[in-house]
Amino acid sequence: MVKSETSLIGSKTDTTFNVIGGIPFPSYSEHAIEYTQQLEEQPEFFGNISLGYDIAGFSGRVSVFHQSEYFRSFSPSKRSDRVIAAYTRVDLALKQKITDNISVQLNLNNLTNIKEENLLNNQVNGYKILRSSSLYGLTADLGVRVDL
């Protein structure tokens, strides 16, 4: 787990109304404020857990990788922050020894078929909009290893 934050100085606009002749006229004033926020490009939680089994010439591994949502960049107005969505991916690796010198390997990646999503986050009004989404699907690698 990663706890990362920074202190920043920003500004806040206060609006007051002066009533002249029954008509309200707005008056704006800016003042400095200090606030803390998460650092860019720093997911708060990420991790990888693997579970494996070996017997005779067979080896198998299941791996789960999780990454929490994080800010890619912040906007000055807090209305168009860029966010990378959280995801969890599962991979599988298998290896079978055929002879003392030959083995076959199979790697299956992204068994959960996750999407990588880029979001626009409006912190002021409290909503997120999908900007882009990439779905890479399941990929596989098959190989033969020959030891000489």
Image (cartoon, rainbow, N blue to C red):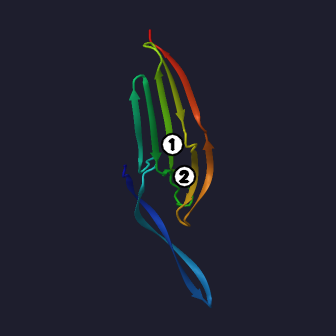
Q: Which label belongs to residue 54?
A: none
| Tag 1–tag 2 contact (CB < 8 Å) | no
Q: Quadrant of residue 7?
A: bottom left
Residue 98 to residue 125: above or below: above
As displayed, is residue 25 above or below residue 125? below
7 or 21, which is in the foreground? 7
Q: Which residue is mark 1?
A: 89
Question: SS class of the residue under badge 1?
Answer: strand
Q: Residue at x 57, y 30 (%)?
A: 140
Count of picture labels:
2
Instruction: Answer above or below: position of 46 versus 81.
Output: above
Q: Could you tell me which residue is drawn at 60 percent across and 88 percent down? A: 20
For marks 1 and 2, give the one nearer the viewer. 1
Q: Residues within 10 Å of mark 1 (few under 14, many from 20)?
A: some
Q: Amino acid at mark 2?
A: Arg
State the separation of the CA atoms marked 1 and 2.
22 Å
Residue 144 image position (x, y, % from top left): 52, 18
Q: Crowding at label 2, few (<14), some or many (≥20) Cα neighbours within 10 Å?
A: many
Amino acid type at mark 1 = Arg
Name the residue tied to disc 2: 82
Residue 47 percent across, percent down from the top left: 41, 44
The mark that comes first in sequence, 1 or 2, is 2
Element under disc 2: strand
Residue extending farthest top? 148
Q: Residue at x 62, y 91 (%)?
A: 22
Give the residue at x 55% y 84%: 18
Residue 72: where, in percent of width, then height?
51, 49
Seen in the image, is 22 located left or right of residue 102?
right
